[in-house]
Amino acid sequence: MAPSKLRDLPEGADLLTGPEEEAETSDHDGHKHGLTTLTIGAIGVVYGDIGTSPLYALREALRPVAGHGLLRADVFGVLSLLIWSLTLVVTVKYVIYLLRADNRGEGGVLALYTLSRLAIGRRSLAVLGLGIAGASLFLGDAVITPAISVLSAVEGLGVLAPSLEEFVLPITIAILVGLFMVQRHGTHAISAAFGPIMGVWFITLGLIGARHIVGDPEVLLAFNPLYGIDFIFRHGVVAFIVLGAVFLAVTGAEALYADLGHFGRAPIRIAWLGLVFPGLVLNYLGQGAMVLSDPSTVSDPFFLMVPHWALPILVGMATVATVIAAQAVITGAYSMVRAAIALGLLPRMSIVHTSERQSGQIYVPVVNWLLLGGVLFFVLSFRSSEALASCYGIAVTGAMIVDTTLGVIYSVRGWKYPLWLLLPGVAPFFLLEGTFLMSNLTKVPEGGYVPLILSFTFALIMWTWWRGTQLVLARESKEKVDMDGFAHSIADSATVKRVEGTAFFLTSDPSAVPQALLHNLKHNRVLHEKNVILTVETMRIPVAPEDERVEFTPMDDHFSRLRLRFGFMETPNLSRALGLARRHGLKFDVMSTSFFLGRRKIIMGSRAGFARILDRLYISIGRFAADPSEFYHLPRDRVVELGSRITV
């Protein structure tokens, strides 16, 4: 399969789907940055979420079995489950296997969806459903992660001094509000320090863990998986509940796959195997050793690992680490939404670039404020990381199962692995993640229903938008007028007045006459001397190759076609992109140029039942779409919008 030749209009393309300024890939190119620099960057951005799990994962996992006294075998069993979950889910599945499934260097569930879609070679509603489910579950998780991460760190103040407990919520809220407020200014300068800070964090995790391991080296027996298996068989239903808490240790694993395009495969693997994984394992083992020596520390094993004089330092470091983790999730949500827009799963939204050097540094105002509202709701509703843990993990588990399923589809159809050979290898992951999902579903009555409702809402919006757009495109295709025949018939028409200048008519179907052109001709009875039928394609690869970016085709003296192609990880900027077209023969004067946009008004049809509800929801969602001239960065004083009515 040759990715550079794969292009396809998105299944949910609207009027235009996707151009953008040229992606600045040099900042993410492993050949132009040293491996060390990229590895340090990966430590800060990729592993922020999973790196803060020690604050609460072991505490929540031991809680169900700590009521009647902790047995040594119980601690070994829980530690064994933690270690082998990290080994199998993160190391084997993501670091070793799924990082190989990259779409032009990009990873994540939507990249894996496009790979699977292209490998199949046709539209598949099942694969589309998996892509929507994965993206929705990721966004559902993105609302919870900042809340539980920052809250769990600030709760260290209560360990430092019980009198400070009343300030935990106000400080948490202040940190979160401040974090979301600075997003519009960009995080490039701050993110440069993420890597070194998180590097120190993981070293600290390892050192304070090793300090307690020395006091009870027998805890290293937890590396034996038989302790975990024995724990499950001995505790039955309780072990099932414990597994839901054990899964907290691997939340954030999907992020290392989603951030593949930012750092590359090698830096992510080196960071995990060389620092992150050892630091996490040492810390969990150290917490276990401390709990064995003093069972009373099970109430908060992480912060009680250090002497009281060092506690303020650890609380400060934990707070900074959780802010970094929250920042990584917020940035991931922006990128996910941008990709979903380009793939036709969401309506246009205003996207602001906060860095002139990095195309990945973006800010999506609507997403930012929705996330802040959701995060504050979780903090104020649950009020503690212990309570939040009851609803954390369900969305992440579902997203991981989607990754595994899409990985199997792509392995069979893209890599051509025989299914009979693949199934024995992936069956343990389906079993493990399925068990994690079922154990997390026991949290539904305690608050787990919230991320499920959030994820379902996001999925419903994406499906409704894709379905509605397909109906609109189908209706337009029935009414289209052939562009070549139209150009030939009007070439020598004496009834049409020609005016100087160039007109760009934006359309998703270059073979049909744009509705804006027909309306302009019908009502104004004029045509410009030069008319360019402009189509913007979103390719099913992250960044369009330069040699395929522009395609200019003259039709006659008055009409020509211009096709601009962009990857789904790029954001529209037509003003800049048109400059590239000059090199391909397009001539126009900006001051005598007009951009004609077709503004569609969707009208309810005669369908009844659930289909009518979806139609009404589609129309409602469309009202929140960003103005096309703003979304595509067109010069405001050069844009003309002409409306049409379409019944769905």
Image (cartoon, rainbow, N blue to C red):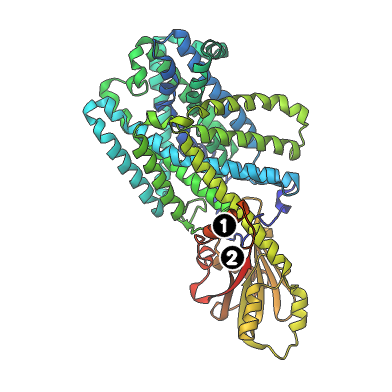
Residue type at the position of mark 2:
Ile
Quick check: marks 2 and 1 in contact, CB under 8 Å? yes
The residue closer to the viewer here, 44 or 291, is 291
Q: Is residue 37 visible?
A: no
Disc with the residue nearer the chain's start (2 vs 1)? 2
User: Could you tell me which residue is drawn at 72 percent across and 52 percent down?
Assistant: 6
Give the structural element (helix, strand or loop) at label 2.
Answer: strand
x, y percentage for residue 247? 51, 26
User: Could you tell me which residue is drawn at 55 percent across and 36 percent down?
Assistant: 254
x, y percentage for residue 410? 70, 39
User: What residue occupies the far left of the structure in this picture?
Assistant: 163
The residue closer to the viewer here, 74 or 601, is 601
Give the structural element (helix, strand or loop) at label 1.
Answer: helix
In the picture, the disc for residue 618 is 1
* Image quadrant where one finds the C terminus: bottom right
Q: Badge 2 local density, few (<14 within 10 Å), some, or many (20+)?
A: some
Q: Is residue 272 visible?
A: yes
x, y percentage for residue 407? 67, 36
Residue that badge 2 annotates: 602
272 versus 457 height, above or below: above
User: Could you tell me which residue is drawn at 57 percent across and 32 percent down?
Assistant: 269
* Image quadrant where one finds the N terminus: top right
The residue closer to the viewer here, 84 or 25, is 84
Residue type at the position of mark 1:
Tyr
Q: CA distance from mark 2 to mark 1?
A: 9 Å
